[in-house]
Image (cartoon, grey):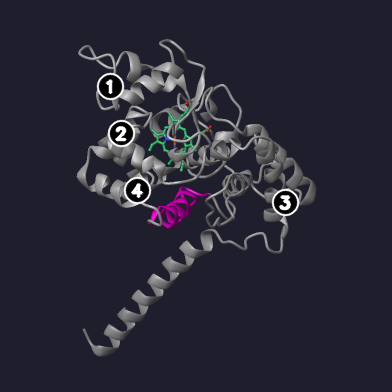
Amino acid sequence: MTSSSLIKCVLLSIGAILLVTSSVDAQLSTTFYASKCPNVTAKVADVIKGWIKSDRQMGPALLRLYFHDCFVRGCDASVLLDGSQSEKQAAGNLNSLRGFNIIDDVKAKVEAMCPGVVSCADILALSAKEAMAAFGGITWTVTLGRRDGIVSSVTEGNSDLPPPFANFTQLVSMFAKKGLTMKDMVILSGAHTVGLTRCATMQSRLYSFSSLTPTDPTIEPSFATTLKKQCKQGDQNTIIKMDQSKTTDTWDFNFYSNVIKGKVVFQSDQALRTDSAAFQIVQAQNKAGGPFNSEFQAAMLKLGNIGVLTGNQGQIRKKCNKIN
Ligand code: HEM
């Protein structure tokens, strides 16, 4: 190669790298609505604060709603669409996801202020963040500019949402499918330090685990007794706290000490003990002043980028539960 063609080649490569970097950066930004709807974040924060004041436990519920949106078809608000075959009907969502009414309320108030401008996908992203900020203990950066999808599929919901009986290998591969690492999975699972679950999700773990033992032997025995007191055999409906180690739900790193002690509600939580690299991460998170919050913030930013629609893709829905 002559020196001039070498220079040309280097310049072209730099150009290509810059192009890729800028197109990735151009996807979402924190200032996306700065001129189009400058007060959107303040408005969402205001409306959400009111809801969390009347029921603080809706903080974790909105965080989960956002996670479930991003995991199926990307963060495109497909989880909010009504329909007999929509994601709402998927096993991990039906009779389980909460907070749709809150998103509808936020959307209506934002629409009144800036009609046709802010997507339901961004409203969900902002609401989850503001809800957990109002709940207390954690906040993260939300980048904006997502557009809303027009498809929502129960089949995709069933295949892409991790079930509570997933083993470690299944969890890693389900997160990898979304571009998230094993570490992201371990860190994001820390969200189970807050929130509620229905007794339905742990019936088999407590009462019909295998032909050899009715109760999962990895549950610490006194914890199994605590759970059985609250969730009787056959009870599908009672709702209990996932972190049983405290009376008031607070954002902390308890999830990781619960994993270490065998005091977590799901097999998928307990699975984080079954791999030595994952268990090292669990142990690193289990300390005051540890890396949990900053690593959770970074992982949330990644979660919010999954499969986003931007530019002219999708639409800006007028109502979050149906396409325009
Ligand atoms: C690693 C795979 C995961 C599995 C298998 C899983 C499974 C579950 C299940 C079964 C419930 C209880 C649902 C019910 O009883 O109706 C739940 C609740 C919850 N999950 Fe996860 N989850 C996972 C990851 C995550 C992630 C990544 C987040 C957020 C970043 C998250 C946030 C939550 C929250 C906040 C709740 C409580 C919701 C409420 O109070 O309404 N989960 N999860």
Number of the label disc, if any, that sits on residue 43: 3
Local secondary structure at mark 1: loop
Pointer 3 with pointer 2, Cβ within 8 A: no
N-term mark: 4 or 1 = 1
Residue beneath the point at 43% across and 57% down: 294
Nearest-to-viewer mark from 4 and 1: 4
Q: Judging from the image, what secondary structure is the residue with disc 2 in?
A: helix
Q: Is residue 296 magenta?
A: yes
CB at disc 2 and ligand 1 closer than 8 Å: no
Contact (Cβ within 8 Å) of mark 1 with mark 2? yes
As measured in the structure, the alpha-carbon distance from the residue carrying label 3 to the one carrying label 2 is: 39 Å
Residue type at mark 3? Lys
Mark 1 vs mark 3: give the one in front.
Answer: 1
- Disc 2 + disc 4, Cβ < 8 Å: no
Q: CA distance from mark 1 to mark 2?
A: 11 Å
Which quadrant of the view contains residue 171?
A: top left
What residue range appears in magenta? 291-308
